[in-house]
Image (cartoon, rainbow, N blue to C red):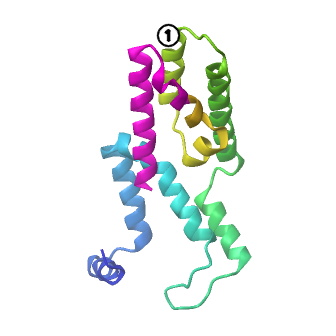
Amino acid sequence: MDLDNFRSILDSASVDVWTLIDAALTVASVDYADEFKRRRDGIAERLYKSASASSPCRNGVQNNNTKIEKLLEEELNPHGVLFDDENKNKNNNILEIKKQLECPNQSEDTLVELLHNLDHIDITYEALEGTDIGRHVNKLRKHSSNDVRRLVKLLIRFWKHSMILF
């Protein structure tokens, strides 16, 4: 959708952009909970990118005021340190699973449980990259167990799909 078209829709509907965003987030979280959960990290990354990028404003004036950028960042991350703690906990869980995957001769049941645990963690691109968990999971693609291979394939496919969305 063209930005000018979007602006004209907002003007004709007599709705400001912030009300629309709030309503869209509410509808997405209620009506499309699973997809919203999968996409939220990508949405947050896009918000942070747009807040920190010094791109021209609508009126063509360059915004490089660090105080405004800091306020925007605080507004986009209202949880402050709690948000970082949540990511640290996720990364710690991922690193613990990675450590267990590194142990040789794990039983099939243990590997299946570890892969299921990974599946229940919302992993961001940064977490995949920072923890290097993808490389360790990928090594299990040639495991002798059909269940392990199947779970690895599904997990990697899900990660690739969720990273492509944003």
- When asked about the image quadrant of residue 73, the answer is bottom right
Q: Nearer the viewer, residue 150 or 68?
A: 150
User: Visible in this render: residue 120?
Assistant: no
**103 w.r.t. 11: above or below:** above
Task: Kindly identify the residue that appears in the image at 49 percent across and 9 percent down.
Answer: 109
Look at the image and say whether residue 158 sits in the magenta stretch: yes
Residues rendered magenta in the picture? 137-166
- In the image, residue 40 lies at what x, y percent? 47, 49
- In the image, residue 6 lies at what x, y percent? 32, 77
Q: Is residue 150 left or right of residue 141?
A: left
**103 w.r.t. 44: above or below:** above
- In the image, residue 85 lies at what x, y percent? 69, 40
Q: Main secondary structure of the magenta part?
A: helix
Task: Kindly identify the residue that appears in the image at 46 percent across and 26 percent down.
Answer: 141
Q: Amino acid at mark 1?
A: Glu
Question: In the picture, which quadrant includes the C terminus?
Answer: bottom left
SS label for mark 1: helix
- When asked about the image quadrant of residue 75, the answer is bottom right
Q: Nearer the viewer, residue 1 or 24?
A: 1
Q: Is residue 47 left or right of residue 18?
A: right
Task: Kindly identify the residue that appears in the image at 49 percent across and 86 percent down.
Answer: 58
**42 w.r.t. 115: above or below:** below
Q: Nearer the viewer, residue 92 or 105?
A: 105
Question: In the picture, which quadrant includes the N terminus?
Answer: bottom left
Q: Sort mark 1 into few (<14), some (14-19) or many (20+) by Cα contacts within 10 Å.
A: some
Q: Is residue 10 left or right of residue 138?
A: left
Badge 1 is on which residue?
A: 108
- When asked about the image quadrant of residue 18, the answer is bottom left
**129 w.r.t. 119: above or below:** below
- In the image, residue 115 lies at what x, y percent? 50, 23
